[in-house]
Amino acid sequence: MSFKKDMFSVISWNVNSIRARWLLLEQLLKQEKPDVVLLQETKIEDKIFPEESLGDFGYNVCFYGQKSYNGVAILSRHPLESIQRGFLGSSEEARYIEAETQGIRIASLYAPNGQDVGMPMYARKLDFYEQLRAHLSSTLSSCDVFVIGGDYNVAPTDEDVYDPQKWEGHVPCTDAERAAFTALLADGFADAFAVWPSLQASAPHFTWWDYRFRFFDPKKGLRIDHFLLSPCALEQSQGGEVLLAYRTLPRPSDHAPIRWMLR
């Protein structure tokens, strides 16, 4: 898919360890030249985050990490301001970071996986969504261009799953998870890949594939990585795509990067 060079490019990617995926991240920055990159599952403490190395690529960086688990970051070619790590009521887990750059509010989000229905992590996941909704409802202004990219760990509909019967009643396809995600849309946000006409015509747009498959099959995935857009962000949108090639390279993340374009 081709986009005009003067568009504002945002890429979101669950790297499943920034250290393990460093060479692929370098390749993405060099080849795609995004204005902003939102990373999830960086799995690295703040004191050893590769801020200087990313600066060599021309990016300002803010990050919120912890050892071995979770971790989110924002990379921008422009200054980053009004940085917020986590939100009121959230746990100490590093799952949300928000900032402003070039007049755009941007956030990187990594929702809990949930493990399985009835597990403590499943309840924590639903609680995370309640806290997220409260934060967004209290901060969103009608004039904000606000883009929230990340791994939401929810496949919103059966169309976002390669085998709905197999996944029925299982994380990340349970009714409660889907209702929690849909509640964000009810508050005014748009699920970018679900509403953009040309992307609807070419769906599904899977973003995650199980490592346990012996061979990578692009048709056997889930769509759990999303961009949520405020109304003003949607008005300025020019479309997006899944950068599938990065899932086919050596030592890939189990997620592919997703890109969204604004004018």
Image (cartoon, rainbow, N blue to C red):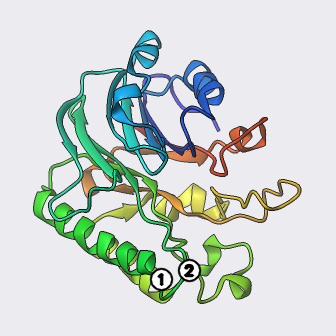
Q: What residue type is labelled 2?
A: Cys
Please give the name of the residue rendered at 62% of the width and 71% of the height, measured from the top-left corner: 160
Please tell me whether mark 2 sits on a helix, a strand or a loop.
loop
Q: Nearer the viewer, residue 172 or 239?
A: 172
Q: Which residue is drawn at 51% across and 27% down?
A: 4
**Hey, which residue is sitting farthest top in the picture?**
56
Graded by Cα atoms within 10 Å as few (under 14), some (14 to 19) or many (20 or more), the crowding at tag 1 reads few
Image coordinates for residue 108, horizontal then vertical, percent: 37, 47
* Residue at image mark 1: 119
Q: How far apart are marks 2 and 1 (CA)?
A: 15 Å
Pick the quarter of the image with the N terminus: top right
- The C terminus is located in which quarter? top left
Q: Is residue 13 visible?
A: yes
**How many numbered circles are shown?**
2
Q: Residue 78 carries which label?
A: none
Side (left or right) of 91 relative to 50:
left
Q: Is residue 24 rendered to the left or right of residue 237?
A: right
The percent position of residue 161, horizontal first and vertical second, equals: 66, 73
Q: Is residue 263 visible?
A: no
Give the image location of residue 201, x and y in percent: 64, 63
Residue visible at 39% across and 21% down in the picture: 51
The answer to whether 26 is drawn above or below residue 249 in the figure is: above
Mark in the foreground, 2 or 1: 1
Question: Which numbered dot is residue 173?
Answer: 2
Tell whether label 1 touches label 2 (CB within 8 Å).
no
Q: Earlier in the sequence, mark 2 or mark 1?
A: 1
Neighbor class of circle 2 (other Cα within 10 Å; few <14, some 14-19, many 20+) is many
Position above or below: 194 against 245:
below
Q: Which of 219 and 233 is in front in this view?
A: 219
Q: Where is residue 208 in the image (x, y as percent from the top left)?
A: 65, 58
| Front one among 44 and 246 | 44
Q: Which amino acid does label 1 sit on?
A: Met
